[in-house]
Image (cartoon, rainbow, N blue to C red):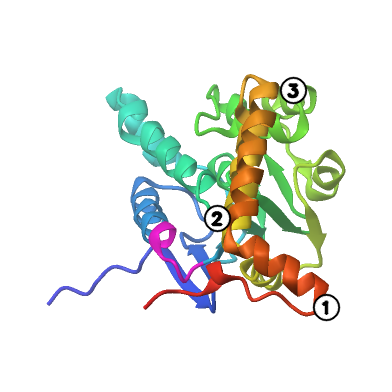
Amino acid sequence: MAVPATPLVSVDRYGPVAVITRRNPPVNALTLAMTRELHSILIDIGAAKDVRAIVMTADGGKAFGAGSDISEFAELIRAGDVVERKMAFENETFSLLANLDKPTIAALNGSAFGGGFEIALACDLIVAEGGQRVGLPEIKLGLFPGSGGPVRLARRVGSGRAAEMILTGEPISVETGLRWGVVNKVVEPGEAIPYAIDWAQRLAHQSVSGLQACKRALRDAVFAVDGERAIRDSLELTRAAFAHPDAVEGAHAFLEKREPAFPSLVIAP
């Protein structure tokens, strides 16, 4: 009997929080096989009602993710099907992560470059350990960060800072990233994953319907071409939120000075 290969992506559960860990030592380079495993896991987690928040991380080593496996990339370029076989599916997978209706946190327990950084940018929040760096260095290889990185980075930090990072290919420290708005929190070495799990636990106990509405409104605000339309859509999301039982429970709990027991947190058998 063949021994099953070690998974490149695994999931650990901490109550309502799912921690997704990528493993490809020493630098957790992104491969086609890893992307396929990640895609499948994201579909399962997206459909799991008992998962209410997600932490994305990597299995230590030297980096959270040092980008794509260059040897694999070179082979695909020679074959002339890098977009069809690799980039299109990476885009689909990272967009799947970005569009989950559950809050997502990237826990950078190492530096993040190229595709590794693009995975982090697809998450709602980024926690990074001090002393690490992030960047999109593809230009130095005559390439382009083609899995959503330019768009998502520019939406986070503005076109000027994004241009500085992408056109030069130079990384920045996470401390600089904190000032620029690339990352949300910088923590001590070894603390990114525990901090992210604790943060995710707190988010997991918010109203499910409320979080979904927040994520939808944020997506509309960031990606809608027409800002006024995004505001109008946000109003409709507010209307739906106030009509949801979670809003009724939230108001009662506030008046009664107690923690809310949101109906949306109850999982039907």
As shown in the figure, which amino acid type bears the numbered disc 2?
Answer: Val
Name the residue that disc number 2 marks. 27
Residue 45 or residue 34, whichever sits in front = 45
Is 155 placed left or right of 118 in the picture?
A: right
Q: From the top left corner, tell me how far across and down residue 58 is, in percent.
A: 55, 62
Q: From the top left corner, tell me how far across and down residue 116 is, in percent.
A: 56, 47
The secondary structure type at the circle numbered 1 is: loop
Q: What is the crowding at mark 3: few (fewer than 14 residues within 10 Å), some, or many (at least 20)? A: some
Q: Earlier in the sequence, mark 2 or mark 1?
A: 2
Instruction: Please tell me which residue is depicted at 47% across the width and 63% down the height of the picture.
Output: 23
As shown in the figure, which amino acid type bears the numbered disc 1?
Answer: Lys
Q: Which of the labelled discs sits on residue 159, or is there none?
A: 3
Q: Which of the labelled discs sits on residue 257, or is there none?
A: 1
Q: State the CA–CA distance, disc 3 to disc 2.
A: 29 Å
Write down the quadrant of residue 134 in the picture.
top right
Tag nearer the camera, 2 or 1: 1
Q: Which residues fall within the magenta stretch?
A: 45-51
Q: State the CA–CA distance, disc 2 to disc 1.
A: 49 Å
